[in-house]
Each structure stands twice: as structure tokens, then as C-alpha cells.
Amino acid sequence: MRSAYSVDTVRTAERELMARLPEGALMQRAAAGLAAACADLLGRVYGSRVVLLVGSGDNGGDALYAGARLARRGAGVTAVLLAPERAHAGGLAALRRAGGRVVVAGGAGGAGGGAQGVEELVERADLVVDGIVGIGGKGGLRPDAVPLAAAAERSRGAVVAVDLPSGVDAGTGEVRGVAVRADLTVTFGTHKPGLLIDPAREYAGSVRLVDIGLELPAEPELEALQHADVARLLPLPRAESDKYRRGVVGIAAGSARYPGAAVLAVAGALRGGAGAVRYVGPAGDAVLTRFPETLVSDQGPKHAGRVQAWVVGPGAGDDAATVGEVLAADVPVLVDADGLRLAEAGVVRARRAPTLMTPHAGEAAALLGVDRAEVEGGRLAAARELAGRYGATVLLKGSTTLVADSGGGAVRVNPTGTSWLATAGSGDVLSGLAGSLLAAGLSAVDAGSVGAYVHGLAGRLAADGAPVGAHDVAAAVPEAWRNVLG
């Protein structure tokens, strides 16, 4: 399990650790890890050209001390100071003792002199280290740092961010302005939320965690499942299992206009671990043609037979009666697509059994009464707000899929997936898959996060770098399942 903690929690842990260590020891730990990561990325340190972009905070100090270590190994290191009067004195002295060079951003001393000369210095570097802003930065880069970020992006060398890319919000993943785009982010002690959540995650590149000895609370702010975590949660049949003990999931989906949504939801459900799938709706013939093992009824959810969970909404059109009937059931319910629009907030809040809502950004924006861009720019806040408003678990789909529970606790961040999953019907497959996991006995949070993990992995396996359809994703779920179990 990968965990991420809030900025306040990290700062508290750092203060507590610094109080027990000799002065400067914590920064030296961070600098050693940063220098090692830079050396690994360079391959050959001796003779390489390294440029440090140095702000006024501790990140600048980390960069300076790491630069000193690289200079002692023969690299040509130049520090570009954005605030020379506030640069970390100890780090600056260490760099100069190691033979490093210092120039001032916007001033003379770079190649050719002046601001243009400094930018050329950055562009020609083999490695650029971003130590401009620390985890407390808000609102994008200051104007004087923007040209350096642009030069780093144009650079032929790799860009390494110290703790997180400058200009992104460490706590929310928001990017409100210009930010540094890194190839590698070396983060200390723990992941920060912004390293796991888009849009900030896109700026971080690969992430390398350096352990500096922080003592952190048991419950993080965010957590990302890994293969081993998912393997422990996947429902596996036992010798005494039958189809009812494994769980039966009901699918109330599809319409005369959208029969394919029902077929795809059933496809996901059949591969999700439950023992049987009951389908209710007008697309029964289409479902049976593709999946004759499905138990089909045209009598409505109340008369479909026993189920341990329901999925309602994909392709449902304006069938509010079916959505209301499913929400009245005393079993876990997954609500997706049209069902999200038709479900009354008060009815969802009043349910005693778990509810899992699975909107994409546009649907979440409509439910919250905001613009889609606001949801996409602040995904963590949107997922939490929606979960609280409906008293439900919310799986917010997108480039970063988040699973938030109304009761608080850590928000799950899904680390699998591919942009090829942005295809019609993919969400219907996910709904059926996660609904089947609900019927198999997983909690709403686990069903949502495990479903998203397996679905994302299936998308990767199915695509393999090429376009895929939703039916391909459904067909790849068993392979993804086997991949997780090893």
C-alpha cells in the first residue's frame, strides 16, 4: 500500500524528528537520497552538467547539498538563485566548497550574461534539479520563476523535482498556474497527495520515495492499493462455495435505445467474482444472446429473485421508477450513469445499506452544480464533497480515479489504468465488475477501489498501446485477475 499524508501532518512529523536529531541531519538525509537519485539518472556523473534551480525554502537547501555531493563526484554544478538573499546559507557554502558555481536568476553570470544567459545554461544542462518551491507552495510559480520552468522543459536533459514539482499544490493535486514538469520527483518521508492525483500527478513524472525516518499516523490521507493489497481482497471460492454463497448481483440497466450498456455491465459482472448475475430490464434478449448464463427477468427488481447487491443506471434513460425501486432494496447498491441523475439525494442519504456512486467528472459536476473544469481541477475536494452530500461512497472516474467514503478516512487513489480506457461503455464494464464485488461481500470502498484497480489493469492488458473497445476490456478482466494473484 502506498500512502500519502497532508502537508500539515508531514511538517509536524518533520519537526518532531528534527528535535531528536543533530541540527541539519534531516536535510542531509534528504540531500543524500536526492543526490543518489540524480546520479542514477545521469549514469555517468563525472563531467556532466547539472543546474540547480534554487528557491528560498528547504527544498532549495536540499538541492544545494545534493549539488555539492554531485560536484565532489566531478559534475559541473551551477546553482541558479531566485532569491539570493534568502538562499540556504549552509547549502550554498557546501556547494561553493565542492567547486560549484552560483549565478543569480535574471542577473549576470550565466552563459552570455543576463536572463537569457541563465535560460541557455538551463537548456544545455544534462540534469536540471527543481528546488524552487517546497510543499507549502500555492497558486503556481511566481513570474520570475516561469522562464526557468520553461527553459527546463526545453532542456535536453532530465528534470528532477525536489519533493514535488514547483507550482503544484501538494495537498490537493491542483495546478493553478505554471508549474515545473519533471521527469522524476524525489520525495521524502512519504508521498504527498499531489503526487498521486491529477492534474499535478502529470507534472511529477516517475516518483522515487526516500525514507528519512518520519514517524507518521496510522491512517494516511490517501492510499493507493498495490497488487498484494488487491490479491488479499479479491473474493475466491472455497470448496463449500455455491453460486449463492459466492453472491448474486442484480443488473438493472439498458433500454431500447441503449441495450449495449446492459450487455457490457453484465459482461463486467460475470467476471467480477459473484456466483450468478440476474438481469432486469428491456435488453434481456441482447443479454441472453451474448451471455446465456445470465438469469433474466422482465418483472422488475422486486420480483427478480434474491440478490446480494444491485447495479442500476447504465443506459437506463429516464427510467426513474426502476432506480427508485433498486434504491429501496436493503442490499448494497451501485449507482452509475443515468441512475446518478435519477437518484434523489434524500433517498440515497436515507439508505441503511451501502451505496456506491460512480460518476465521471461531468456527472459529478452536474450533481454538485459546478463546472466540469472545477471538478477536474480539484478532484479530491469534489469526491469528498459528493460523498458527504449523498452519504455514500463515491468512485470518481477519470485520469485519477478516487474512491471517497462519506464517513471520512483515507481516500483511495487508483494507480492502474490507461488513457485508452476513455472509450464508450468502459464505465458500464466497471459498474458490473464493482457491483459483482459488492455482491461477493466486499465493502463499498473495497469494491470500488478493487474494481477500479482490476478494470484499469484489464484496460492496460487489452490495449497494449493500441485502441480497444469496452468489450475488449471486459474480456481482459480474467487475465488481470490472474496477474494480480500472481
Image (cartoon, rainbow, N blue to C red):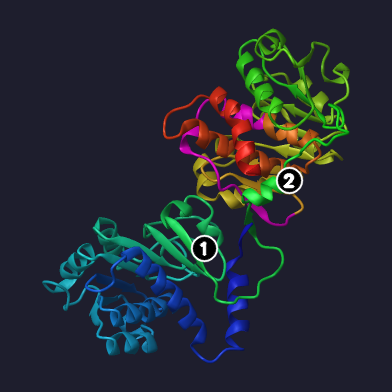
Front one among 435 and 374:
435
Residue type (three-letter) at the residue carrying disc 2: Leu
**Distance between the alpha carbons at the discs numbered 1 and 2:** 30 Å
**Does residue 133 appear left or right of residue 429 in this picture?**
left
Residue type (three-letter) at the residue carrying disc 1: Ala
Q: For mark 1, give the secondary structure.
A: loop
Q: What number is the disc on residue 241?
A: none
Mark 2 residue crowding within 10 angstroms, few (<14) / some (14–19) / many (20+):
some
Q: Is residue 383 magenta?
A: no
Q: For mark 2, give the secondary structure.
A: helix
Residue, disc 1: 170
Q: Is residue 332 above or below residue 58?
A: above
**Does residue 315 appear left or right of residue 346 in this picture?**
left
Q: Is residue 461 above or below residue 204?
A: above
Which quadrant does the C terminus fall into?
top right
Residue 214: image location, x then y, percent: 61, 75
Identify which residue is drawn at 73% across, 55% down. Answer: 408
Residue, disc 2: 233
